[in-house]
Image (tube, rainbow, N blue to C red):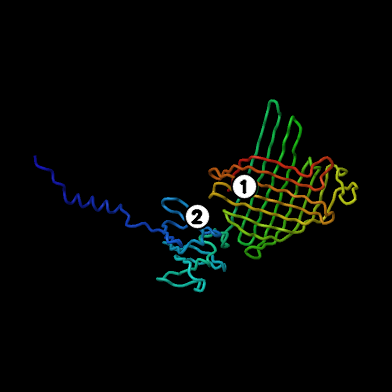
Amino acid sequence: MVPRTRNPTYSLLVLLFALGFCPAGVPADELIMRNGDKLTGTVISKQGDVLKFRTPYADSIEIRWTRVASLRTDKPVTLLLLDNTIVEATFITAKSEADDAEQQEDGDTVILAGSVGLINPEPWQIARGTKFTGKVNVGVKSERGNTDTDELYLSGEITVRRIQDRFNTFGRIDQDRAQGKRTTDKWDINSKYDYFFTKKFYYTGNLSFESDFFADLDLRATAGVGLGYQFFESKELNLKLEGGVNYVDENYIDAEDRINAEDSADTDDREYTALRWYIDYDQYFFGDFTQLYHRQRGLWDLEISKNYNLKSWTGLRFPLRAGFKFSTEVQADWDNIPASGAKELDTTYRFMLGYEW
């Protein structure tokens, strides 16, 4: 039997076909750490002191910017420098602060790491768009049998952010019934407008309405202005503080239940001026595993110094999938001069399912 000979032309075509599907090298960004470690992949962004870098083996990782020695990208990336200059570059290095912020190396623009504010900033951060974010949380409970209980908690928040201003609205409804009787019946809505005159400082104006049946509060309307400072603003960490002056108009369900702290005399519905403070903080821990948050809003009566009230929300959010989150929260409402028969502190613990976009 004569052995079958392979056609040389056929073998050459097979070889050329195989070589055509073998990549000669995949372009990648190169990250060198101060300790000498080298990573290849794709730079995602830099926000605050965190650089996000995607590698073929670990998807997205977060690296402290101060630990980066140099970053070279395959294609130019958009940078927002600390002096608000927008540039495109392919090479960033941590050189001496005495060096010029921009140099030339092998024809590439070289940027000092210490001058970089953001890498691949969001459009709103460079005045090229508007960012819309929001949250919705729902807590529902219904029991039948030895107890007859219905609970409903609904809250929502919308924020519109542009490079120089921000609009935010937050509202909630909390209603509970036990044995066919109301045990909780309160709601509030709060709107704010912030105008940034520097990167951190901003003027703020606020308008709010709230009602709490069992605290004898038919309606409290407030409006005011103030000054705020944005310490941090990123997905990983947010913190802002505000202070200002508000006009307050309070209307009570039963005005005779309200006692003036100064002279122990009955008082009617009131209008007064108050100092206002506001704290808003949230931060992710263990990557994106859990988020701690705290929000506090307070009013201090300038006419009756012992009259002040504050509301705070403190809790943990646990991201699930596709924008859904599970939250556990404690809400504390403090009124230093409560209605007759009401307590100064009202504390609520709740579990909620939410969605963010």
Residue 196 is situated, as x and y percent measured from the top left of the image, at 65, 62
Which numbered tag is attached to residue 339? none
What's the residue at 45%, 54% (across, down)? 54
Q: Relative to 303, does residue 179 appear above or below in the rendering?
A: above
11 shown above or below 93: above
Residue closer to the observer: 153 or 348: 348
- Residue 56 coordinates in the image, percent (x, y): 41, 52
CA neighbours of label 1 inside 10 A, class few (<14), some (14 to 19), many (20+): some
Could you tell me how far apart the alpha carbons at marks 1 and 2 are, in whole angstroms? Answer: 25 Å
Q: Comparing marks 1 and 2, which lies closer to the viewer? A: 2
Q: Is residue 290 above or below residue 302?
A: above
- Amino acid type at circle 2 is Glu
| Front in this rendered view, residue 256 or 296 | 296
Q: Is residue 347 left or right of residue 35?
A: right
Secondary structure at numbered mark 2: strand
Q: Residue furthest front?
A: 35
Mark 1 touches mark 2? (CB < 8 Å): no
Give the crowd class for mark 2: few <14, some 14-19, many >=20 residues within 10 Å: some
> Label 1: which residue?
135
Q: Is residue 259 above or below residue 234?
A: above
| 185 lies left or right of 110 | right
Give amino acid for label 1.
Answer: Lys
Q: Is 18 on the left-hand or right-hand side of 260?
A: left
Place of residue 161 in the rendered image (x, y in percent of width and height, measured from the top left): 62, 57
Residue 158 percent across, percent down from the top left: 64, 50
Q: Nearer the viewer, residue 264 or 127?
A: 264
* Nearer-N-terminus badge (1/2): 2
Which corner quadrant holds the N terminus? Answer: top left
Q: Which residue is mark 2?
A: 62
Query: Which residue occupies the extreme top position in the image?
Result: 145
Q: Mark 1: which secondary structure?
A: strand
